[in-house]
Amino acid sequence: MIRTITRSALGAAALVGALTIGVAGVAGAASTGTGTGTAGSTRCVKAEALVPKIQALEAKVPAWTTKAQAREAQANAADHPKVAARIAARITRVQKRASRGEKLLSTIAAKCGGAGTAS
């Protein structure tokens, strides 16, 4: 019984301490005022650094898709429907990612200037 009371007292003290520090932390965060406004420009710098990588990956998609479609046709001809279905799913996934890359490039171009041009 004494252990239970001791645990309860220690738990209550820890809870009060955490709440006190938490409230003080919120008050301290609320009192810090003006920001510099560089978050948007930092995002744009990081996004513009991704543009060449996205464009390079998008350039590879058509060649890869052509090869994968040939492999899919070969699998269908050899009567391997499961293999062909997996290749088709992979083609769909790659094309979806390519369209997501195009959308990302247009978003970067719209929000950060003309750096990200969709191809």
Image (cartoon, rainbow, N blue to C red):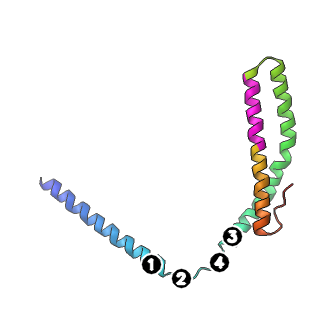
Q: Viewer-nearest of labels 3 and 4?
A: 4
Q: Earlier in the sequence, mark 3 or mark 4?
A: 4
Q: Which residue lies under the disc numbered 1?
A: 28
Q: Amino acid at mark 1?
A: Gly
Residue shown at the point (23%, 62%) measured from the top left? 10
Q: Quadrant of residue 55?
A: bottom right
**Secondary structure under the numbered disc 1 in the rendered image:** helix
Residue at image location 76% in from the left, 61% down from the top: 107
Residue 59 placed where, x, y %?
86, 48
Q: Over which residues does the magenta segment extend? A: 82-95
* Residue located beneath label 2 in the image: 33
Please tell me the numbered disc located at residue 42: 3
**Residue at (87, 36) in percent of width and height:** 66
Q: Amino acid at mark 2?
A: Gly
Residue 90 appears at what percent x and percent y? 74, 35
The tag earlier along the polypeptide, 1 or 4, is 1
Question: Label 2 near label 3: C-beta < 8 Å?
Answer: no
